[in-house]
Amino acid sequence: ICLLYTPYSFAKRKAPEEVDPVIHNGTKYIVPHWDFSGDQAQNGGYIEAWDLKLEKLLWKLKIFTIEYDKKVENAVQDIFITKIAIINGNLIVWNERGDKFVVNLETKKIKPKNKIYKFNKSFWENIFGL
């Protein structure tokens, strides 16, 4: 039996740690790592704002985009948010790559905007010697 495989398909990652929610002006901001609803294009990279009194979702915002390589297992390409905080009325978001994003809570504009992550083959080659 001859099996064809991509070496990256055997690369595993540990599950992301839960991110503590932040409460500001009656709104709870949370980080949903997984898409159980089916409406997200990726795992990770989203923030949700919930009304504390009504326990109702106010909005969901994609902070960054992951462009998946179809030849590589999605799990090793996922990038997750690691921390959120309110600073000067803005929501600050950090991810596993060490990048920081600033979300204006009034306009929902993100800086830097339109950040796209693509699979970095050389990163995995250096780690696993592939």
Image (spheres, rainbow, N blue to C red):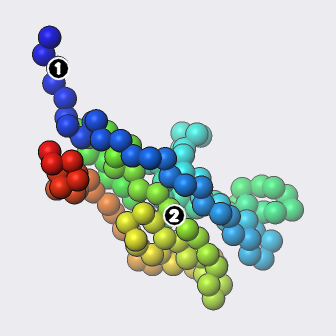
Tag 1: residue type?
Answer: Leu
| Residue 107 point in image, percent of width and height | 59, 77
User: Are the residues at dot 2 and dot 1 in contact (C-beta closer than 8 Å)?
Assistant: no
Q: Residues within 10 Å of mark 2 (few under 14, many from 20)?
A: many
| Residue 100 point in image, percent of width and height | 45, 75
Residue 26 relative to residue 77: left or right: right
| Vertical side of 22 occupied by 44: above or below | above
Residue 30 relative to residue 111: left or right: right
Q: CA distance from mark 2 to mark 1?
A: 37 Å
Q: Is residue 41 visible?
A: no
**For the residue labelled by badge 1, is the local secondary structure a helix, a strand or a loop?**
loop
Query: Would you name the residue on which mark 1 appears?
Result: 3
| Residue 34 point in image, percent of width and height | 54, 46
Query: Would you name the residue on which mark 2 appears?
Result: 82
* Label drawn at residue 51: none
Tag 2: residue type?
Answer: Thr
| Total count of labels | 2
In the image shown, does 47 or 57 lie closer to the viewer?
47
Please name the residue shown 74% across and 71% down the image.
23
